[in-house]
């Protein structure tokens, strides 16, 4: 393959790129536009608001829906961060062992992780609901962190295992011969090289936890632990005749912004981290 | 500087594979020893056991007379250069070289570290690259950084694991000379693993030839070349490799495919009642009969050779002469060939002739060799029946004297430089 494209190829690539962008961004832009509409403008059938209003944002940040939204935002951030941290620490240790050591059941761990990740969440949520109620985990942070780990751990283990596999083992041995203890060799020769991979994995794990809806809505009932995606469903309009569409859109925009900012800031690391496992740098 | 001695070292891998079968070796202080052999002979495993990256199944490893079998690599105070260099990609060249010094916390001040790194960098001509990352260096520069990391600290010995195999041929030749010079000037005990017999011959004070985890012979390069103990060592050492011919013993004559050779009384006695032997003649022991003086020609054996192909290399030329081998010997030689990682298609003789020789492709040319330099091997046990213990010992003693002289010269130079 050559690096330069002909004019014709360039044209078709541009067309494909535009189609994909519109496909992916149209809903986001639509929600963004809706979030600035007044309740009375919702059913006018216009894409952009007639008058740009921030009333929806006021409602969720300082108005009626404040308690519902801000507490869920706190829950979402807390639960996602804790789940991510635990997943990354466990996955780093597991992936290091998988990448470095020969032990029976190595393939089993990887296969089991894959199996867990393809298991549909909806099929275990009902038994989990009953179990959590019985043992008192229902509507608690821990009650969400545990199922989130089942979502984030498999992908973290897989990405990190691929990442560790391509760090030459000789580096660690060289460090040991140079006079390092096992721990020093790990910290000074391996960790700096693994850091981008760990970072990427953490971001991916965070997004998975942040975006979950099924567990969030099924395993919580109050402000104590309800995360944002679930809380959005509990928004009400100003009166029972009003749809809370505007407020929901505003909240959706607020929770999407940190994700978008994170991705934009770290897109190079994410791409590097995702491709490094497969392609030898 | 330290002496290293291996006593009956055995390595069995977890899956039961016996990689090293009881190797004993004494490496003197300041000596440059090469471990050489075809792939899978256990040479790298042996080196990794010395440095401590591989557990020793049984046997004793002594450094300076102290048993270190169970010591962690960092306690052994050895420096190693890895085949792929194992440079730390996130550190600059300076920090890579300084890495071992920084690990010894509190041992050196920042000033001392800078001084030591500067010295190492100067020795290896890396001064201009200290701020660069390994990814931006050429293969030869990376190799030198790896060596810098080894020489920067007071290591008791240097261990090299095929350090030149990733370089191209020209650079390999230059680095080989560089390593040799460095070792001579520092006088540090060195163990060097390679599969390349040229590196082994040119670098080592002594060369240990390994085959399938067993030590075949340890001797000076010259000793290995002239007095190999068996067929394997004879075939491994030398390039182009030694020619092996079937020899039928008929009375006092040894019948080779190319000529009949009269047996000396001494050799006749050593052959005993064997009827078939393997005869080894080095390519450079053949000469063009036309270029020899009469008295010398008469002292050897001349024969007519149907030359198939001639390769002219400038300084010499290789003449290839196909011959029919004996079926009993052919199977033995096939086995040897497999051991040596070779894949020869046909049985042919190689003669390294002077470049003045008028030999041409397709000629029938008269060649000459001296039967006294011919080696005779037992086809079953592969032992060298012409092995001369006294000559071998004399060669090794001469070699040892040369080594001591070189070390003394280096010490004298060092003293002169510091005075």
Image (cartoon, coloured by chain):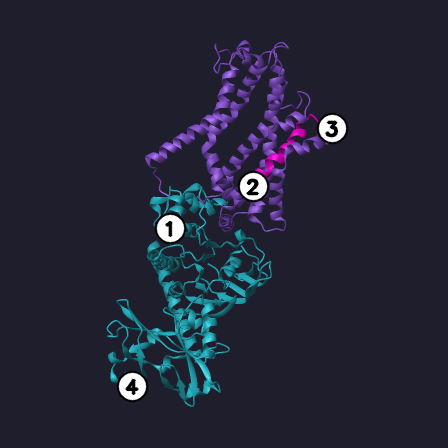
Chain colours: A purple, B cyan
Q: State how many labels appear.
A: 4
On residue B298, which mark appears? 4
Tell which of B286 and B307 is nearer to you.
B307
On residue A133, which mark appears? 3
| CA separation in Å, label 2 and label 3 | 32 Å
Label 3: how many residues lie within 10 Å, few (<14), some (14-19) or many (20+)? some
| CA separation in Å, label 1 and label 4 | 53 Å
Tell which of A192 and B365 is nearer to you.
B365
Q: Please identify the quarter of the rendering in which residue A140 is found.
A: top right
Give the residue number, with chain letter if any, for mark 1: B139
> Considering the numbered disc 1 on the image, is that residue within a helix, a strand or a loop?
helix
Q: Is residue B172 above or below residue B291?
A: above
Which of the two discs, 4 and 2, sits closer to the camera?
A: 2
Which of the two discs, 1 and 3, sits closer to the camera?
A: 3
Q: Are marks 2 and 3 on the same chain?
A: yes
Q: Please identify the quarter of the rendering in which residue B398 is found.
A: bottom left
Label 2: how many residues lie within 10 Å, few (<14), some (14-19) or many (20+)? many
> Considering the numbered disc 3 on the image, is that residue within a helix, a strand or a loop?
helix
Q: Quadrant of the N terminus of chain A?
A: top left
- In the rendered image, residue A149 lying in the magenta stretch gets the answer yes
| CA separation in Å, label 1 and label 3 | 63 Å
Residue A20, image x and y in percent?
A: 45, 29
- Which portion, as a residue range, is magenta? A132-158
On residue A158, which mark appears? 2
Asked if marks 1 and 4 touch (Cβ < 8 Å), the reply is no
């Amino acid at each position: 393959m050559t690096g330069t494209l002909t004019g014709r190829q360039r044209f078709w690539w541009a067309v494909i790129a535009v189609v994909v962008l519109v496909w992916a961004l149209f809903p986001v832009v639509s929600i963004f536009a809706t979030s600035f509409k007044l309740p009375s403008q919702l059913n006018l059938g216009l894409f952009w608001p007639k008058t740009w209003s921030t009333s929806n944002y006021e409602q969720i940040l300082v108005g009626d829906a404040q308690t519902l939204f801000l507490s869920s935002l706190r829950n979402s951030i807390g639960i996602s961060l804790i789940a991510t941290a635990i997943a990354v620490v466990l996955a780093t240790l597991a992936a290091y062992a998988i990448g470095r050591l020969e032990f029976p059941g190595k393939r089993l761990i990887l296969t089991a992780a894959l199996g867990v990740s393809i298991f549909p969440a909806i099929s275990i949520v009902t038994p989990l609901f009953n179990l959590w109620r019985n043992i008192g985990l229902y509507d608690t942070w821990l009650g969400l962190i545990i199922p989130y780990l089942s979502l984030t751990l498999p992908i973290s283990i897989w990405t990190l295992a691929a990442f560790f596999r391509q760090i030459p083992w000789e580096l660690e041995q060289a460090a040991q011969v140079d006079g390092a203890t096992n721990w020093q060799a790990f910290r000074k020769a391996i960790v700096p090289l693994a850091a981008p991979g760990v970072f990427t994995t953490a971001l991916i794990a965070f997004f998975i936890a942040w975006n979950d809806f099924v567990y969030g809505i099924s395993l919580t009932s109050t402000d104590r632990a309800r995360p944002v995606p679930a809380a959005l469903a509990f928004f009400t309009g100003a009166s029972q005749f009003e749809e809370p569409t505007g407020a929901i859109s505003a909240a959706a925009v607020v929770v999407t912004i940190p994700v978008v900012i994170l991705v934009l800031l770290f897109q190079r690391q994410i791409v590097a981290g995702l491709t490094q496992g497969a392609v030898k740098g | 500087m330290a002496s290293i001695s291996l006593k009956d070292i055995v390595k069995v891998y977890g899956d039961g594979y016996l990689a090293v079968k009881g190797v004993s070796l004494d490496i003197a202080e300041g000596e440059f020893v090469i471990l050489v052999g075809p792939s899978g002979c256990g040479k790298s495993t042996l080196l990794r056991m010395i440095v401590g990256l591989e557990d020793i199944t049984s046997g004793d490893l002594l450094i300076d007379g102290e048993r270190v079998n169970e010591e962690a690599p960092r306690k052994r105070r050895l420096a190693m250069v890895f085949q792929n260099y194992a440079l730390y990609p996130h550190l600059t060249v300076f920090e890579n070289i300084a890495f071992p010094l920084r690990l010894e916390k509190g041992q050196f001040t920042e000033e001392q570290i800078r001084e030591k790194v500067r010295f190492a960098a100067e020795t290896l001509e890396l001064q201009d690259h200290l701020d660069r990352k390994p990814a931006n260096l050429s293969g030869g520069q990376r190799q030198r950084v790896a060596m810098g990391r080894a020489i920067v600290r007071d290591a008791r010995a240097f261990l090299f694991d095929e350090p030149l195999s990733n370089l191209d041929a020209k650079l390999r030749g230059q680095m080989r000379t560089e390593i040799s010079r460095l070792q001579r000037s520092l006088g540090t005990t060195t163990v060097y693993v390679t599969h390349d017999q040229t590196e082994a011959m040119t670098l080592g004070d002594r060369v240990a030839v390994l085959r399938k985890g067993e030590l075949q012979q340890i001797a000076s390069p010259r000793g290995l070349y002239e007095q190999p103990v068996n067929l394997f060592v004879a075939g491994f050492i030398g390039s182009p490799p030694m020619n092996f011919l079937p020899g039928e013993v008929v009375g006092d004559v040894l019948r080779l495919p190319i000529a009949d050779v009269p047996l000396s009384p001494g050799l006749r006695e050593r052959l005993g009642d064997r009827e078939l032997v393997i005869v080894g003649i080095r390519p450079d022991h053949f000469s063009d009969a036309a270029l020899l003086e009469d008295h010398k020609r008469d002292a050897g054996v001349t024969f007519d050779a149907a030359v198939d192909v001639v390769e002219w290399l400038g300084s010499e030329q290789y003449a290839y002469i196909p011959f029919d081998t004996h079926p009993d010997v052919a199977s033995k030689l096939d086995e040897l060939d497999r051991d040596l990682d070779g894949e020869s298609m046909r049985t042919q003789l190689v003669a390294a002739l002077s470049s003045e020789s008028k030999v041409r492709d397709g000629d029938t040319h008269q060649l000459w060799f001296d039967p006294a330099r011919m080696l005779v091997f037992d086809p079953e046990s592969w032992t060298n029946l012409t092995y001369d213990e006294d000559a071998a010992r004399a060669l090794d003693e001469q070699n040892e004297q040369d080594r001591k002289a070189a070390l003394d010269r280096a010490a004298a130079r060092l003293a002169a430089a510091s005075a």
